[in-house]
Amino acid sequence: MSVVQSVDSVALLPAYLAAGTAVLVLLVDLLLARPAATVAAAAVGAVATALGAAAVGAGGERRTFCVGADCSYVFGGRAALVATVVPLLVLGVLALSGPLLRAGQTPVGEFCFLLACSMTGGVVLGAAGDLITLIVAVETLTLPLYILVGLRRGSLASAEAAVTFFVVSVVATTLTLLGAALLYAVTGGLHLERLGTLLADPALPDLPLTTVAVTLVVAGLAFKVAAVPFHAWAPATYDGAPLPVAAYLSTASKLGGVVALLAVVQHALPPDVTGPVLALVAALTMTVGNLVALRQRRTVRLLAWSSVAQAGYILAPLGALALSADADARAAAYAAALAYAVFFVLLELAAFAGVVALRPAGADGGRLDELRGAARRHPWVGAGLAFALVGLAGLPPGLAGLFAKVTVVRSLLGGDAGWLALVVAVNAVIGLAYYLRFAALLYAPDAMAPTARPARAVAGALAAATAVAVVVGFAPQLVLDLAGG
């Protein structure tokens, strides 16, 4: 067997474009030193990356860095979906960052460069075919966020959030790397599909070392999606970070964690081991997230805890894997998990865009009472935020959120996990309480504090995210087909 790895530059085009965006931003900031030009370079690079990913994905699956049948980079429909969504999220976050960057507390060049570097990790992540590529991509997505969270000068809360996020992420990465090393010690393989084949041997999963390895990998990646009991960092980090960075953490970063966890569960790890664990984690995550969200009075903390609950809904289909021997049911569960994540990040970005639009430039999310009556003064922005909240709750006219929950419940029933479908349904009802309370507050009379006039870029980002969510809500099968590819 040849040990020379083939290189398909077409498959790598989205990664080239994302990395090139980071270099372009760095050069523009160095040579021109004009904030508007730097942001424009980052935005153009994000658009080019999304278009490149869509174009490459339309041509069918492409594999590169292969040794024999094992490939480290597999760019198919699912990878194209992720590599398209992540740059679009970056584009949205750049629009949300306009007021923050104009306030002068955050350096524009560093902000855009770090965001482009993180985008590169997200683009590569969806196509990762082995554990090394997967972990490096996850860390490339995450490492710039340590700095972005604490990049707001003079903010103690931002510094504390950055330290919290850094410490927890380092622990998570250590667990994942240790688990990957133990898997290699047990199997002698690192490629995800080969690991799946090797661990299908009944003797290997019964080894104590295999159980420890699988546990460590799943636990390390569960940190990235803020799943219970690895969730405590998320509310403090989101609340202390600048609002656009919190939006990125809650969307692109969470999507990356879901993609990484989905890759190892689908291809590498034995489903009869991971299924029951993920089912329990999903049930705990959605329940704890919803119950604590009911008590929140700060805007970003409510969105953070609701994001924890949403992670439970995303993980729920994966918990049905061990409960069904039907290959079609398992494929539906994988597609449902990723499709829900895509639906969620679109609505979550719209929710953060609404909050940014209604808050003063450079301010944090503040308290919920500070947004009382905001929709009466800014009807269109308030309607966009209310639409996002209703969609996250899974109610019409937020059809994307409705179809997301229906997709999850259908996959659970198809996987013979009726008890978990019941848990999802009960938690969806609990979630209605705080989502609808927040939406109603926007239209309540007697505001306690004035709200800022929305910036055009932020209002545009809110309109775009809402429009995409509406379109996706009317064509959910397209996302499901791509997620299953």
Image (spheres, rainbow, N blue to C red):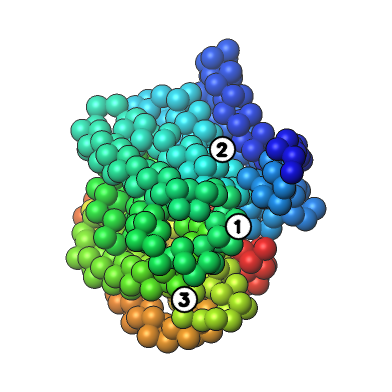
Judging from the image, what secondary structure is the residue with disc 3 in?
Answer: helix
Q: In which quarter of the image is residue 2?
A: top right
Upstream in sequence: badge 2 or badge 1: 2
Distance of label 1 from label 3 (alpha carbons) = 18 Å
Q: What residue type is labelled 1?
A: Glu
Name the residue carrying label 3.
322
Query: x and y percent of residue 401 in the render?
Result: 49, 70
Evaluate if marks 1 and 3 touch, with contact meaning CB atoms under 8 Å apart: no
Give the residue displayed 44% in from the left and 83% down from the top: 417
Q: Dividing the picture into quarters, in which one does residue 309 lie?
A: bottom left
Query: Which residue sits at x=52%, y=33%?
Result: 117
Q: Find the distance from the CA under tag 3 to the CA under tag 2.
A: 33 Å
Label 2: how many Cα within 10 Å (few below 14, some 14–19, many 20+): many
Q: Name the residue tied to disc 1.
A: 193
What residue is disc 2 on? 120
Task: Assign a secondary structure to mark 2.
Answer: helix
* Residue type at tag 3: Ala
Query: Residue 36 at what x, y percent from top left?
Result: 54, 26
Determine whether the residue tagged by mark 1 lies in a helix, strand or loop: helix
**Displayed quadrant of residue 382:** bottom left
